[in-house]
Image (spheres, rainbow, N blue to C red):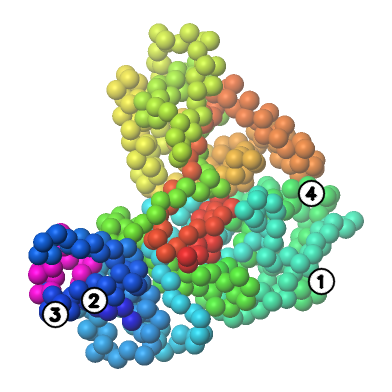
Amino acid sequence: MIDEKVLKLNNYLKNHEFNRTEVAKLLDITERQLSRLLKKWEASGYIKHSTGIGRGNRSMVQMQSNIEQLFINQVLNEIKTLSLEEVEDLMQLPLSAFSKKIILTYVEDGIYKHAKTVQDDQPNVLVDYLYRIPKDFDPLQGVDVAASVIIQNIMDRLYEYNDKQEITSRIVAYDVWEEDGYKILINRNHYFSNGQLLNAQDVVTCLNRLFEHPLYKHLYENVIKAEALTTFSLKIYTKRKMANIQLLLMDSAASIYKCIDDVYYGTGPFFVHKVEDEMIVLRRNEALLTNPAELSQLYIVSDREMYMEFFKEHNMIKGTDKNISFVNNILFNPNTTLSLNDRRKLCLLIIEYFEKRFANNTELFIRLFDDIKDYLSQFNLENYRIEKTIKLLYVNYINPELKNIYEHLIFSGLDIERVNVSFDEYTKTNLNEFDVDFIFMIENIDINHYFFNMLQNSKLKDWYTDNPESRILMTLFNEKHNAYWHYAEEKLGRYLIEEMLFLPLILGYRKYYLPQQFKSNCAGANQFFDYSKVFVV
């Protein structure tokens, strides 16, 4: 195990420049012994050491490795052999509060009693931030991004995108369209995290619940039912061939799961071990036989201070995943009393704010509003005044940007009425229940099939599912091959912008930070960060 003295040196260097005499005293060794240790640690790659001039007090020492993370990984690997007294001694070491919490979680949960003895199994722990901790993992609830992140990592879907944006599957071995429906043969070696083997009836149970659910049944109007044919084969009976069946079945709502005593088990790379108010703990699904995750445990926290403590204690490497994109939008109620010019003027004022906020395109953000501003310039709205009171649905937990937009519109002289709702109320209530004119949205959506996906699982479906232009798009996706889909997307987008019912503002990409001993390979091919694609360097 890593020498505890390295930890003490690491902690010392956070607040002091290296001083040979002070460090020797801190470690309770002689300066000669310290010199030998420094050479040893440098050879191990832990530090970079350069000898100073004169008496040596000016020597330079820099930490080269994430000592605390390496130490914690070693502790977790050996924790089943440690006594409680040895664990108590560990708690006295200069470790961050979060590292100590990780160790205690393993001990309290009895990991050392139940861990699988696998010779090459090294516990690798990661901490990541999420704006809220979901408590409900039913894929058919009104899910938001936070819930989808967890669902995507604990459950599989029949289809998914790979890193090349090609449709693939971990579950489906073979599929074919037959005269009366879509036949699927599933792999015979897929297990839920509780150890039960996935069979065709499990898949059918999830699919039929999806097909009949009020939030999603409009997407499956051509589906009659799903039925298990054998232990590992099933058929989705349809009224006609559906060109977009695979696209529909890769959505979070189409996840495959078992629910036993209100606990959701999936076949994904992780399972939910523990949920607290500000933290959720995911563990590697040991029942996964092919391509298991290298991360053994994942702490997802909503407390920024807790996350920043981990962030500061580790050598974090910044990355950007352009497979994960999100779009900031303004969406208008199609039944609003605002006139077309009212909406145009309001959009110009919102663009005015975003022009200042995002002066140029960057690696992380792309401005989407420039062409729309040019389009609106032809209407000569400089002196136009909106006389009506404008009602904004103000979701208390959606994004700090919403507050800035609201304040900018008030400063511009508009009469804005805030209709305040909680985040849970927003996600679980149809927009038609609110008497509002517009909302601000942030959506993690595949931009190649943007409106199709928005009509599947965003708030756009509440106001626009029955819109004639939306129905044309869904019909083309259902009945025509993918050469027609781009045309359908453009047609609906053009209609919404010409009527100024929809204003795309910013396209952003997922920024993430990983400790230096990890790397991410093609995470987020399905628009959500895939923690199974985080590897140990």
Question: In the rendered image, is residue 280 in sight?
Answer: no
Instruction: Say left or right for 467 vs 235.
Output: left
Q: CA distance from mark 2 to mark 3?
A: 10 Å
Label 1 Cα crowd, 10 Å radius (few <14 / some 14-19 / many 20+): some
Q: Main secondary structure of the magenta part?
A: helix
**Can you identify the residue that label 1 sits on?**
229
| Mark 1 or mark 2: whose residue is earlier in sequence | 2
Label 4 Cα crowd, 10 Å radius (few <14 / some 14-19 / many 20+): many
| Mark 1 or mark 3: whose residue is earlier in sequence | 3
Q: CA distance from mark 1 to mark 3?
A: 73 Å
Label number found at residue 37: 2
Q: Are marks 3 and 4 in contact (CB under 8 Å)?
A: no
Q: Examine the image and state in which quarter residue 94 appears.
A: bottom left
Name, please, the residue furthest toward the front. Answer: 54
Q: Which residues are magenta?
A: 6-25
Identify the residue at horizontal 59%, vertical 27% (top origin). 496
Q: CA distance from mark 1 to mark 2?
A: 67 Å
Nearer to the camera, 122 or 353: 122
Tag 3: residue type? Ile
Label number found at residue 242: 4
Instruction: Classify mark 4: helix, strand or loop.
Output: loop
Instruction: Say left or right for 299 vs 121.
Output: left
Q: CA distance from mark 4 to mark 1?
A: 20 Å
